Amino acid sequence: MFMTNEELWQKTLEEIRFEVSTANFITWFQHTIITEQKDQAITVGVPNAFVKEWIESKYQKPILKIIRNFVPDVRSVEFSILPKLSQKQQPASLVKKQQPQEQQEISELSIDKETNLNPRYSFDNFIVGSFNELAYAASQAIVNNLGAVYNPFFIYGGVGLGKTHLLQAVGNEIRRKNPHTKIKYISSEKFTNEFITAVQNKETNYFKERYRMIDLLIIDDIQFISKKVQTQEEIFHTFNTLYENNKQIILSSDRPPKLIENLEERLRSRFEGGMIADISEPEYEARLAILHTKRKEKDLTIADDVLEYIAASIKSNIRELEGALNLIAVRLKLQKSPLSINEVKEILSKHIQPRKVVTAKQIIRAVSKFYNTQEKFLIEKTRRKDIVKPRQIAMYLLREDFNGSYPYIGQKLGGRDHTTAIHSYEKISRDIKKDKQLQEEIKQIRLNFYYNQE
């Protein structure tokens, strides 16, 4: 039976929806369509280079397999960038939107007293990007093989990057799949306080039994046991008992085990004996994807350029991104009209640490102005010799000062392949070390886009 592009993609997305979390579905598949069926090949349109790179590397084979269930003759799936898709909405049937009442009910759910797990943390609302991919994949593996793989599992990363969310998502998912699993989530500080109380009340046997007879122990912020000799002793013996009985142990910290000061070597050795995964700061494209997802979840009317400004302004962590979006949501509710960029700048300046922020557009504008050329020549697919150097410098600055990914940079400047962006960045990086004239030129360009922003 012949299917139109829209019908085929609709059916494909319905299948994909069962394979990924709601958050990932919204992030990666919300603005996609089939643009062409030709010569046993399917072309899927995506909104930007970041989405293209991610879907190609993670979902190309599953997508092809699903499509071939409907159209067996298809032999390949390709992806093309269509920026206008960022405004396209998916059918409501594909992305279930929580009503305000539902959101309220979730937020009001109390923390489980037995497990200490907060039900609002789940895999469904956890955003996955290259910055947390390894930790997420390991967490999924643990859910399916509790105590058998990655034991212990040690996650580290800065404040507000989603460690607690991921830890509790593991616990909640295991609890959902098997309600009889004995789980305990606790911060190291609370563990210490409970242990001290048990010692004072002569209830250490009860304390030990409580923590050594469980199937999954999750300790958050383990770095705070530094210098706490008795707590370390208790955790050491608890760890050994659980590990020897094939029970799962998951730990989090703001640093890897080797950098935790005043940690007993025997504990350090055990922490390093399993899987260690870091969660880094999300890159610009990931921050923007998170904001797009949160905008949809909260049903906010916020322009794309406002989200782009927030993503460029807040580089440190996800918590600050959500905080900024919440501030803007409150203003929108009071004002009941769209906010301009200047209004957003004013709101954020009062609540986030001031910092010099640069956007991709400002960098491109500053480079074109310095070399007395038009911005369109840097952006368009032109091979003019006088554009080669300015474009290479723009690529270098987009990487250094904007932290753009190579696919994003290549697409932004002439629709180039990511290898072109890599070559340009590496060339300028080499040349700038020995070319004082180039050093001065880049210095002046930076002064332009940092201190003369329009």
Image (cartoon, helix red, strand yellow):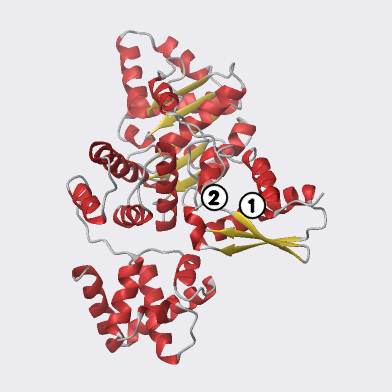
Can you see residue 55?
yes
Of mark 1 and mark 2, the one earlier in the sequence is: 2
Instruction: Locate the C terminus and report the quarter of the image it occupies.
Output: bottom left
Query: Which disc is residue 96 wearing?
Result: none
Residue topped by disc 1:
59
What element does badge 1 sit on?
loop
* Place of residue 239 in the rendered image (x, y in percent of width and height, measured from the top left): 49, 28
Question: Which label lies toward us, 1 or 2?
Answer: 2
| Count of number-bearing discs | 2
Kind of residue at disc 1: Tyr
Kind of residue at disc 2: Trp
Among the 4 quarters of the image, the one containing residue 146: top right
* Place of residue 14 in the rendered image (x, y in percent of width and height, measured from the top left): 66, 41
Q: Say which of 301 and 417 sits in front.
A: 301
Residue in view at x 45 percent, y 23 percent: 117
CB atoms of marks 1 and 2 within 8 Å? yes
Q: Residues within 10 Å of mark 1 (few under 14, many from 20)?
A: few
* Place of residue 352 in the rendered image (x, y in percent of width and height, measured from the top left): 22, 47
Left or right relative to 144: residue 66: right
Q: Residues within 10 Å of mark 2 (few under 14, many from 20)?
A: many
Residue in view at x 68 percent, y 41 percent: 15
Query: Which disc is residue 28 wearing?
Result: 2
Left or right relative to 356: residue 140: right
Image: 303 above or below 331 = below
What element does badge 2 sit on?
helix
Among the 4 quarters of the image, the one containing residue 243: top right
**Label 1 to label 2: alpha-carbon separation:** 10 Å
Image: 404 above or below 278 = below
* Place of residue 364 in the rendered image (x, y in percent of width and height, measured from the top left): 34, 74
Residue in view at x 37 percent, y 47 percent: 259
Can you see residue 429?
no
